[in-house]
Image: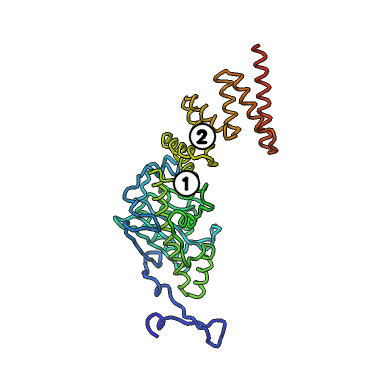
Amino acid sequence: MTGRSEDAEFRPDADSSGIGVRPHLALEELLEGRRVENARGEFFLMEADTSLESFHGDAPLSRFHVVDPGTVGVLSGEPALAAFDLRDAAFLDTETTGLAGGTGTAAFLVGLGYVDGDRFRVRQYFMRDYPEEPALLRGLADDLRRFSRVVTFNGRTFDVPLLEARYRLNRERFPLESAQHFDLLHPARRLWKLRLESCRLQSLETALLGMRRHGDVPGEEIPQIWFDYLRRRDGRALVKVLEHNRLDVVSLAALSALACRWVEDGWAEDPRDVYSLARVLERADLYERCEEQYRRVAAVDDHPLRVRSLLRLAARAKRGGDHAAAVELWEQAAAEGDWWALRELAVHHEHRARDLEAALGVVQRALERLEDHGSPTLHRVAADFRRRRDRLYAKRDARN
């Protein structure tokens, strides 16, 4: 035997005859990495990088060259992130000894990605056993202190609190305590959940980046793979875990840049995505841009979101004092059978236009549409219209 196999340890399988003997392969033999020593001990570090002129799936990483620092604030709806530049951020993902969190859960692997000139670099900090955790945390902290911004995927709920707890337990200062934090999970849901069944990171990879991982390890199996490694010291299964983590970090960066592109360029095409983008823009008080997107959806005949877009445009017109435009939009929505549009029309005719006959006409249209509906909600709506009708009759009689 030559090369790796000569140095590998061997262990018998369940068959003590020696049939099916498999070698143990140390992680250091399988990966290009190095041992790092610091005042707290030793850990294992792996590094990789790729050009920003390359693609991750269908997404060009070159988007980082032109991303607008103001877009993250729009995506997140957080004014504090209004000047959040992805090019200066740390992209963070952890692999842990458990998925439930708590003080007994440790991060045995932390992936850190960042833009460095014309490259995107990924550093992975790995502890080969529990005693290496203090050294891993110290090494990670030394690098994280360069960043005042961090990007995660569900990191507010899981990764960051977990790391903060581990730093505290190891009597180390948490390096991200004053960092601005952009968690992509909720903006991703706002942009894409109407169209996609799942907004998990790998689901977004497939749907938006055109990527499919072949031979990837399921996330729920990762803690057990690490525990198996502790017992057997065979690094082969961990290679997939490390690649899983690296891809998560790069995908997090690529999806962050893509989400910014959707906001900056109005890149949505499917009406569900267009409507979601409009909601994101409206939430950020970008009214002209959100109305443009609502109009795109409203122009699509027979689409389920057409009425909702008409109602959003009508609400914007009403708020802006353009009541004639609001009435026209409500009429379009009412023609599709929407009871809320009919209610808004009834209110307008009764209280603003002071036209009781027009208001009664709208109420009668609504009651005709609602007459045969057995839904408890629509039953209450119909009762509201009947009370409105009775009040309008009383007002008309009082006038006469």
Question: Label 1 sits on what residue type?
Answer: Asp
Q: Residue furthest bottom?
A: 17
Question: Which residue appears at 44% of the width and 37% of the height?
Answer: 290
Q: N-terminal of the two: label 1 or label 2?
A: 1
Q: In this orientation, does residue 54 appear? A: yes
The percent position of residue 340, horizontal first and vertical second, equals 59, 32
Residue of label 1: 270
Count residues near mark 1 (Cα–Cα under 10 Å), then give few for <14, some for 14-19, many for 20+.
few
Task: Give the residue at mark 2.
Answer: 310
Mark 1 and 2 residues: CB-CB less than 8 Å, in contact? no
- Residue 295 point in image, percent of width and height: 46, 36
Q: Where is the N terminus found, in terms of image quarters?
A: bottom left
Which sits in the foreground, 11 or 397?
397
Q: CA distance from mark 1 to mark 2?
A: 17 Å
Picture quarter with the C terminus:
top right
Colour scheme shown: rainbow
Q: Residues within 10 Å of mark 2 (few under 14, many from 20)?
A: many
Name the residue at 57% across, 18% down: 354
